[in-house]
Image (tube, rainbow, N blue to C red):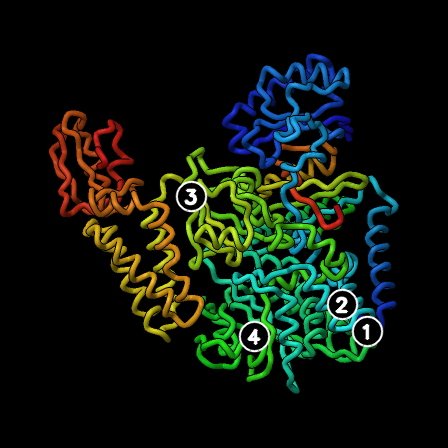
Amino acid sequence: MTKIKTLADLRRIKEEVQSKIKLRENSNHPEQLVQVKVGMATCGIASGAKDTMKYFVDELEQQAIDAVVTQTGCMGYCYAEPTVEVTLPGKDSVVFGYVNKEKAEEIIDVYIKRGELIDGVIPLSFKTIDD
Amino acid sequence: MTDYKIHLLICGGTGCKAAESDEIKKQLKHWIEEVGLEDEAQVVFTGCFGFCEKGPIVKVLPDNTFYVGVTPADAEDIVKEHLIKGRTVPRLLYKDPITNQQISDSKGMDFYKKQTRIALRNCGFINPESIDEYISRDGYAAMGKCLTEYSPEETIKEIKESGLRGRGGGGFPTGLKWEITRKSEADQKYVVCNADEGDPGAFMDRSILEGDPHSVIEAMAICGYCIGADKGLVYIRAEYPLAIERLKTALNQAREYGLLGDDILGTGFNFEIEIRLGAGAFVCGEETALIHSMEGLRGEPTFKPPFPSVSGYLGKPTNVNNVETFANIPVIINKGASWFNKIGTENSKGTKVFALAGKINNVGLIEVPMGTTLREVIYDIGGGIKDGKGFKSVQTGGPSGGCLTKDFLDTPIDYDNLLAAGSMMGSGGMIVMDEGDCMVGIAKFYLEFTLEESCGKCSPCRIGNKRLYEILEKITNGNGEEVDIERLKLLSNVIKDTSLCGLGQTSPNPVLSTILNFEDEYLAHVNEKKCPSGQCKALLKYDIIEDLCTGCTLCFRNCPVGAITGERRQPHYIDQLLCIKCGVCYEKCKFNAIKLS
């Protein structure tokens, strides 16, 4: 990793990273690239988020779906763990609760592959610092 | 790929389900098929919208129309009017209680977005193990701004103007603390992050460290720059292995990028952070005890003054702030004090993170602007009380706080109001109790915790709390007298007045506040030897009603202690001396022949 030596360096890296994320969103196969974020804080892991994450990684790879699966912290919906946020290209992200293996399978088959919403969406309920 | 153009989201939360949301979904689907829109409109269940009072809720996408109080009979109108003719159905729109205006777009509704996430801005959004993702969200920009544009004094001025107060419990103004530590002269100073979160049911700090560790690292560096320290220490309990792991990863990434270490961003500022593990003692959340624990001494508090800002870790000036306090700092610098101090109430600025727990539907982590009422938190965000039961009390401030009744539901939450109501902000644990909870039992629960966690240094706390506990035990065992309530009050006040540190000074609060707000329950325990909530086992009595007992022997076979006797097809009896009041017979009996009194 290169060192960030000045504020200009920091700004350049920020732009690089941002464009990298953008690139990910506007790749050659926008209709296929999917972002999946699994809530992996203690609450999520205790409810089985590790298995859920593994399932998404394995299954999306096996089905050759172009997707990025990453982990994130607690989304706050501890009552509905494991929680998973799915962003289909060009669409608003959707958070699903209680995502066990069966639910994950349904998310892949119905939402990711066919674009149909399924039961169990958690509505967004907060403002961000940019709102 | 079916591309639905319209989505009807219907709340599938507990509250709305109870109000026929299943039937509404069925009806919506029926009418959609009836008018031939099944390829364009989809109906799905969602989790709780958190506005259960006005449920059931149906939201129509993409135009964000928010219908409240929907019944199955309204499905036809929603489909025929809204979906086909493109007109909203006015009678189902939300009416603003103040302006009396109807609002259709949910984005214009305050109630729908009660939460503002500042400290939790990146939690559940970025990958906590990727410094790049943090940087892409303005990460380390605040540190860069301070190091290159602001002098330490200017930075402190900004924090002071923001009105930020310590989120660990006491609510001391953060900027002032930084200024005092800056003014202390010494060859070495320290920045300490207090991550010794110990209240039962609280997990705000853990979630921040697990979800956004870099925000704390960045803020500690800013603090170091302001007070003139080049060393930071994070005191974190060993029970938080994942938080420790993520923090270590983050520290290594920051070092590799040169955002920690020597000559940060070429400004000549040096800063390094170390982790110190604590053994999870509650008292070590008190700053002097925390510092002693880091020094390798027993985790016991010492008298203040001297305050840590004058003489702290290894006798050097030390600035101790809590995790959540730090997590607010980068946003204040980036967005400016004037942005931050517009949020909140007059003396409590910004937001507060709460861990919602207990008998509430949406257990979880929330962040609301100061001044939000308890009712909004519990009903609009928390989705109300579990199993449709009634609200009894909410405990804030952990073992140091108090239990608030429904009279306080409309009190705006801030430091001063909670203190005035006999509780405190504390670190942000919020435990909701329903009508089935016994308040004497709750007081006993918290005291048990304090007993366990008292370091034993000063006698009021060590001995006094033990005596308090014994009196409570006497009451819950049915041996209490009315004078015991007076004894509890007297002893509590002595402990509060004479204890050395915050733990002892606040430990009787759960007792005092439950006596103040629920005296009738105490009186029922001591005078009538009854527990109104049926929670105190010693005060319960199980009897078999002879006329209803068929002699099926089910209770006899299930009683774990052999307290039930009787012949087949003859009424059975419970030997009260052997009965342990487990309630198994009560649950198993198919003829309602077991009486609970």
Q: Quadrant of the N terminus of chain A?
A: bottom right
Q: Quadrant of the C terminus of chain A?
A: top right
Q: Position of residue B571 (x, y in %)?
A: 13, 30
Out of B94 and B140, give the one closest to the viewer.
B94
- Label 4 amino acid? Arg
The chain to which mark 4 is attached is B
Q: Quadrant of residue B21?
A: top right
Sequence-first disc among 2 and 1: 2
Q: Circle 2 is placed at which residue position?
A: B143
**How many residues crowd mark 4 within 10 Å: few (<14), some (14–19), many (20+)?**
some
**Are the residues at dot 2 and dot 1 in contact (C-beta closer than 8 Å)?**
yes
Disc 1, SS: loop
User: For the residues carrying marks 2 and 4, which lies nearer the camera in this image?
Assistant: 2
Sequence-first disc among 2 and 3: 2
Q: Quadrant of residue A11?
A: bottom right
Q: CA distance from mark 2 to mark 1?
A: 9 Å
Q: CA distance from mark 2 to mark 3?
A: 43 Å
Residue that protrudes farthest toward the bottom in the picture: B187
- Label 1 amino acid? Leu
Q: CA distance from mark 4 to mark 1?
A: 26 Å
The chain to which mark 1 is attached is B
Sequence-first disc among 2 and 4: 2
Q: CA distance from mark 2 to mark 4?
A: 23 Å
Side (left or right) of B421 relative to B226: left
Q: Circle 1 is placed at which residue position?
A: B265
